[in-house]
Image (cartoon, helix red, strand yellow):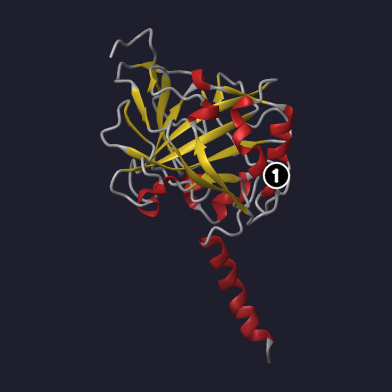
């Protein structure tokens, strides 16, 4: 007599888990069953960038990345996320570069793999060791609103190259050691983004396209800026720290989505050589 209610409740609870984003995991081949846009969307990310259209747009302005403030590093089960920028006295933001509004930094996070092919985007078929995404929210919107608004988000993607220089992530090493387990958090005082990542205040070379979040529900609301000239080294120890992160969505230790179809989209190439703005 107790089995019928359980049978009725089980599929409801299962669907609730997917609605809350609690049950998706890598690899991404199963996402489309519960998040249709991940399978049927026409502007999905990441992509392999092979053909570009040269367009002259203003340089991308990167503002307040040199400032300092407290951040929280957390293991969300599908990666490591650094957040808390909305509480900074001078919140980092980006503007220009073809954007018609300011976009304020909400968080940044990492993508990696067990091998040396952990970047989500590719350039002419080449895949880097890892990739960091700086996620920005359009002025006047909350993060939740932005995820459901066309062009609500703008993301800077920077590649990480396996090398000997481990300077870029020195200010994150201690925190990464403390967030190995899912749900764990660590605060960093007086954190400075530009200390390690070296993103210039005026970005004169970038690739830009319209795409999506690379995690469910794969919302097609993102203006992507790929910064190929801002790539930085990640050392063996630091890459090992990322690989030590445990999460229910990463059973194989990877958090990289597969390459998606371009579907006729244009990738804009803005470079110093073709534009004097």
Q: Position of residue 177 (x, y in %)?
A: 70, 44
Q: Could you tell me residue 108's position as x and y percent?
A: 51, 40
Pinpoint residue 204: horizontal percent, then vertical percent.
Answer: 38, 17
- Frontmost residue, 48 versus 87: 87
Residue depicted at 68% across the width and 51% down the height = 247
Residue, far left: 100
Residue 273 position (above or below residue 83):
above
Q: Residue furthest top?
A: 273
The front one of 65 and 180 is: 65
Q: Residue at x 36, y 48 (%)?
A: 146
Where on the picture, by quarter, is residue 212? Answer: top left
In this rendering, the answer to whether 6 lies above or below 52 is below
| Label 1: which secondary element | helix
Q: Left of 82 or right of it: where is 61?
A: left
Estimate the x, y position of residue 91 in percent, counting from the top left.
37, 41
Left or right: residue 145 versus residue 168 is left
- 33 or 177, which is in the foreground? 177
Residue tagged 1: 177
Q: Is residue 71 left or right of residue 105?
A: right
Image quadrant for the N terminus?
Answer: bottom right
Outermost residue, bottom direction? 1
Residue 162, located in which quarter of the rendered image? Answer: top right
Residue at x-position 73% and y-position 35%: 240
| Residue 50 higher or lower than 224, as above or below | above
């Amino acid at each position: 007599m107790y089995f019928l209610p359980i049978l009725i409740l089980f599929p409801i609870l299962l669907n609730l888990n997917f609605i809350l984003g609690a049950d998706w995991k890598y690899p991404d081949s199963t996402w489309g069953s519960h998040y249709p846009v991940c399978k049927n969307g026409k502007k999905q990310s990441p992509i392999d960038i092979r053909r570009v259209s040269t367009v002259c747009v203003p340089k991308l302005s990167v503002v307040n990345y040199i400032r300092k403030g407290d951040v929280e590093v957390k293991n969300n089960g599908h990666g490591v996320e650094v957040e808390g920028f909305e509480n900074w006295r001078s919140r980092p933001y980006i503007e220009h570069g073809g954007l018609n509004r300011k976009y304020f930094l909400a968080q940044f996070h990492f993508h990696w793999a067990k091998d040396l092919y952990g970047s989500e985007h590719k350039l002419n078929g080449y895949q880097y060791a890892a990739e960091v995404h700086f996620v920005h929210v359009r002025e006047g919107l909350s993060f939740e609103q932005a995820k459901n608004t066309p062009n609500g988000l703008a993301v800077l993607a920077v590649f990480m190259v396996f090398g000997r220089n481990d300077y870029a992530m020195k200010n994150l090493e201690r925190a990464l050691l403390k967030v190995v387990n899912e749900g764990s958090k660590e605060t960093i005082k007086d954190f400075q983004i530009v200390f390690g990542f070296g993103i210039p205040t005026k970005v004169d070379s970038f690739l830009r396209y319209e795409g999506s979040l690379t995690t469910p529900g794969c919302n097609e609301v993102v203006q992507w800026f790929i910064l190929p000239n801002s790539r930085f080294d990640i050392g063996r120890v630091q890459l090992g720290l990322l690989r030590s992160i445990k999460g229910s969505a990463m059973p194989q230790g990877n958090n990289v989505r597969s390459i998606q179809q371009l579907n006729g989209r244009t990738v804009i190439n803005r470079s110093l050589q073709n534009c004097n703005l």
